[in-house]
Image: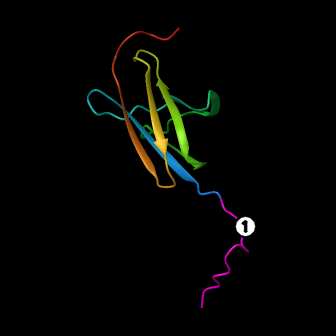
């Protein structure tokens, strides 16, 4: 039997995750690609992708996030996403372009 006491429980913040997959124009995963996740102008986390070109940002509160992705010899990509309490999967395609100095 479930305890349905209303107003007696602590409010829990719902969290979700954003899983980012980075590939090149041919569909090849891009390992060691830098991904920066920001919210409200503040960096949340900056990482590099694994061998499959992926990374999962976990334990995130719902809201608007900016995902910035770059790798040497590829164009920088930036995407704004809205996270709810459900998982969000984002695919980023990097195109060959300017070199990052």
Residue 84 or residue 18, whichever sits in front: 84
Q: Quadrant of residue 4?
A: bottom right
Q: Is residue 3 above or below residue 53?
A: below
- The magenta stretch spans residue 16: no
**Alpha-carbon neighbours of circle 1 within 10 Å: few (<14), some, or many (≥20)?**
few
Q: Does residue 5 show up magenta in the picture? A: yes
Choose between 44 and 70: the one closer to the eye.
Answer: 44
Where residue 35 sits: x, y (%)? 52, 30
Instruction: Say which residue appears at 32% left-offset and 33% top-offset.
Output: 28
71 vs 64: above or below:
above
Is 56 left or right of 39, judged from the image as shown? left
Give how far across and how far down residue 12 sits, in percent.
Answer: 66, 62
Question: Which residue is at the far bottom?
Answer: 1
- Considering the numbered disc 1 on the image, is that residue within a helix, a strand or a loop? loop
Q: Which residues fall within the magenta stretch? A: 1-12
Quarter placement of the N terminus:
bottom right
Q: Residue at x 49, y 39 (%)?
A: 50
Percent position (x, y) of residue 90? 40, 40
The quarter holding residue 52 reads top left
Question: Which residue is identified by label 1?
Answer: 10
Relative image position of residue 7 (x, y in whole percent): 70, 72
Instruction: Please say if 59 is above or below 96.
Output: below
Q: Residue at x 47, y 55 (%)?
A: 86
Name which residue lies at 55% across and 43% down: 63
Whether residue 5 sits left or right of residue 26 in the image: it is: right
């Amino acid at each position: 039997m479930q305890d349905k006491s209303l107003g007696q429980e602590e409010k829990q913040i719902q969290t979700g995750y954003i899983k980012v997959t980075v590939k090149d124009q041919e569909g090849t995963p891009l390992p060691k690609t830098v991904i920066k996740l920001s919210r409200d102008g503040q960096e949340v986390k900056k990482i590099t992708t694994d061998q499959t070109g992926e990374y999962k940002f976990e334990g995130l509160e719902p809201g608007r996030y900016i995902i910035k992705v770059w790798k040497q010899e590829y164009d920088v990509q930036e995407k704004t996403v809205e996270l709810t309490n459900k998982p969000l999967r984002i695919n980023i395609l990097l195109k060959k372009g300017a070199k990052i100095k």
